[in-house]
Amino acid sequence: DQQVKQNSPSLSVQEGRISILNCDYTNSMFDYFLWYKKYPAEGPTFLISISSIKDKNEDGRFTVFLNKSAKHLSLHIVPSQPGDSAVYFCAASAGETSGSRLTFGEGTQLTVNP
Amino acid sequence: EPEVTQTPSHQVTQMGQEVILRCVPISNHLYFYWYRQILGQKVEFLVSFYNNEISEKSEIFDDQFSVERPDGSNFTLKIRSTKLEDSAMYFCASSPGQGWMGNTDTQYFGPGTRLTVL
């Protein structure tokens, strides 16, 4: 299942700099996109989401950008902090209705160095 | 802050045995889900549940699997006869439902149960 793809398995940035995590999708029916953060031995924690009617959503240090024509979304974290070090998953659902399955990407391991 | 809880955190079983994984979704959430993540692979959807019925299931969710909401708080996943390939992290999730959040609905995940089949 390659409908949601995160091509970078890992990313390393310096504390205080910007982290940019990328995600591509192929299913044009996807219309709700989410980013989750996961620490080892824990479940995915919801970070931020965006509906397909928007191209940007911001929440504190986290901003998600959606480019529907390119079927691409990105998560920007600025400034990055060591506590942000985790695996970040992109997920998507179709139909903006409750109960819809989430399709996940492979995840990107972010390491923020002090 | 309300959270999804799961028990046990780790379950070890013999191949062919039945296991029940338990979840307590967030209170007032209406939709419940099970996902799994086999080591080194993506998180995969298994099933969603609403109003005491399965609303969607994946091709993974065959006759060996069943879900139940036995009371007002618990949500369970049963695997009737476990296979080696069922070894994975199993995540429960819940969401409030469209009426609560407008035209989007965010799923919140529990910490997972690590199932090891020997």
Image (cartoon, grey):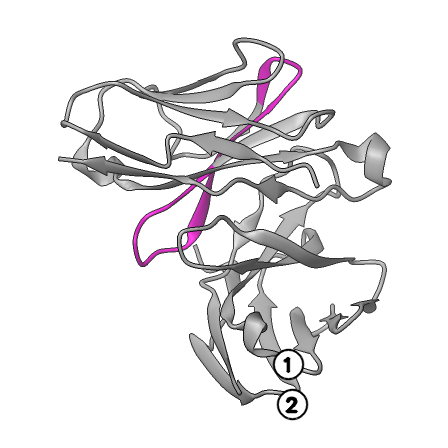
SS at mark 1 in the image: loop
* Residue plotted at (40% across, 29% down): B61
Pinpoint residue A55: horizontal percent, then vertical percent: 82, 69
- In-image side of A79 versus B43 (left or right): right
Image quadrant holding the N terminus of chain A, namely bottom left
| B9 drawn magenta | no
User: Are there few (<14), some (14-19), or many (20+) residues within 10 Å of tag 1?
Assistant: many
- Point out residue A97 in the picture as x, y percentages from the top left corner: 74, 37
Residue B93, horizontal then vertical, whole percent: 57, 36
Q: Residue at x 62, y 82 (%)?
A: A19
* The magenta segment: B35-54
- The amino acid marked with disc number 2 is Arg
Instruction: Based on the picture, tell me whether residue B52 belongs to the magenta stretch.
Output: yes
Q: Is residue A42 above or below residue B10?
A: below
Q: Do the residues bearing badges 1 and 2 touch, measured as CB atoms within 8 Å?
A: yes
Q: What residue sits right under mark 2 in the picture?
A: A17
